[in-house]
Image (spheres, helix red, strand yellow):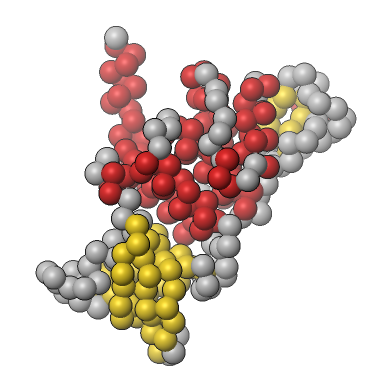
Amino acid sequence: MHVTTKAIVLRETNYKESDKILTVLTPDLGRITVQARGCRKKGNGLSAACQLLVWSEMTLSEFRGRWTVTEAAVELEFRSLRSDLDKLALGSYFAEILESVVREESPADELLPLLLNCLYALDQLDKPLGQVKAAFELRAMSLAGFEPLLDGCAVCDREPDVPRLNLTQGVLHCAECSGEAGDGISMPLSREVLSAMRHILSCPGKKLLSFRLDEGSMTQLGDVCEAYLLTQTERGYRTLDYYKELQAPMTAFQNRK
Ligand SMILES: [Zn+2]
């Protein structure tokens, strides 16, 4: 069977002398594993498309449940993202999240556009990396079926004066209702952060980054969205550890000033 589809590479692993095994996300087939024969040879026609975070049109052939790339034409390379270590690390983290939450051969109708929009933002828009990261994490959780309920306090139903998010239960509650909000750690949210989170969860995809926060609130939003994702998916991400390692020397430097 032959299929022509758009695809983005979420993971690449070298295989044999000149092949790669790729995890790709496609609109039609969801997440699939494909072999790219000879793509590490110099001048091979598949080379450019068979790299992490490249969006291309691929012709795939299937034989006994195994997919092979036979042709590929690059559509978007995200060159400026690729030439910036921090942005590339963040994009790789987005890819690892999707690899984790999208099941093999199940559709990812909304997660795929989310990934492309956020990679585009890193590549072309001058948004703070922390903003793109938080928005991706929270929106991806929602689209993957882990949407936190932020309408009102889960216990008393009122708009909380001092809002908190229970990371395990995925619910908002007031400080006074903490005792009845269920097991798990809760994190405090400022009103600004809560409204940014509501925006991220409910806005049209193209408006995802159309919100502003001061530096302190952006840090809180980042902490909450990351902690929520790690709690809900119950795992760590090596790409996140790497991204944080890259950020660490900069923070140390800023603190010294
Ligand atoms: Zn309450």
Q: Looking at the image, is 49 positioned above or below residue 252?
A: below
* Residue 229 visible to an observer of this rendering: no
Residue most extreme to the top: 257
Q: Residue 168 is drawn in which quadrant?
A: top right
| The N terminus sits in image quarter | bottom left
Side (left or right) of 152 relative to 94 = right
Name the residue located 57 percent from the left edge and 70 percent from the top edge.
Answer: 106
121 left or right of 42? right
- 51, 236: nearer the viewer: 51
Measured as percent of width and height from the top left, residue 71 is found at 30, 78
Along the line of sight, which residue is nearer the eye, 94 or 43?
Answer: 43
Q: Is residue 237 above or below residue 23?
A: above
Residue 36 screen position, x and y as percent: 29, 75
Residue appearing at x 86%, y 32% in the figure: 157
Q: Residue furthest right?
A: 156
In the depicted structure, whether residue 23 falls above or below residue 70: above
Tell me how many marks there are: 0
For the point 68% across and 32% down, the residue is: 165
Residue 163 lies in what quarter of the image? Answer: top right
Drawn side of residue 36 relative to residue 96, left or right: left
Q: Position of residue 92 (x, y in %)?
A: 37, 50
Q: Position of residue 194 (x, y in %)?
A: 67, 28
